[in-house]
Amino acid sequence: MILLENLQKKTGKRVINIGQDLIDKVKNPDFEGNLSTSVEEFLGLFKHADYVVTNSFHGTAFSVIFNRKLYVETKQKDFKKNDRAENLLKLTGLTDSIIETLDDCNLDIVRDFEHAQSVLSSERESALDYLRGICSNE
């Protein structure tokens, strides 16, 4: 949470904490958010965010899909790596989004989302080709 507080001070942006529980609300009353959002609200938060700080694969994936400035903490609370998020960032060439501290949040990084979208498009097509192949061999 200290990371989010510092990012909020640095950017002047509002912080919305998806999955915020009661303890988070008590510790950080200035942050908006709750545990229950609809799918539309959840996706909309990513789509309209100026910045995303996440430690989840899905947060990473939606941020890449919506071309958001993102910062991904790939080390989990148990100190294991979030391999899926890290692999997605490597695949799309967005490894500069991996952070460990706020000092790693370079707000001036220019990300090549055009390349990332091209990679995602190619991966989607490969997956669809694979599925078409499976379905045609019934």
Image (cartoon, helix red, strand yellow):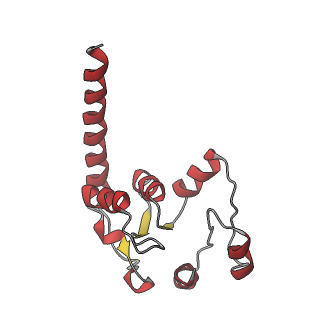
Residue at image point 37% right, 60% down: 85
Q: Quadrant of residue 122?
A: top left
Residue 95 screen position, x and y as percent:
29, 67
Q: Quadrant of the N terminus?
A: bottom right
Q: Nearer the viewer, residue 58 or 115?
A: 58
Left or right: 105, with 111 as reference point: right
Residue 102 screen position, x and y as percent:
44, 83
Left or right: 42, with 117 as reference point: right
Residue 138 screen position, x and y as percent:
30, 13
Residue found at the very far front of the displayed protein: 78
Residue 58 screen position, x and y as percent:
47, 54
Residue at image point 61% right, 62% down: 18
Residue at image point 58% right, 82% down: 5
Q: How many marks?
A: 0
> Is residue 138 depicted above or below 130 in this figure?
above
> Is residue 132 depicted above or below 69 in this figure?
above
Q: Nearer the viewer, residue 80 or 89?
A: 80
Residue at image point 54% right, 62% down: 49
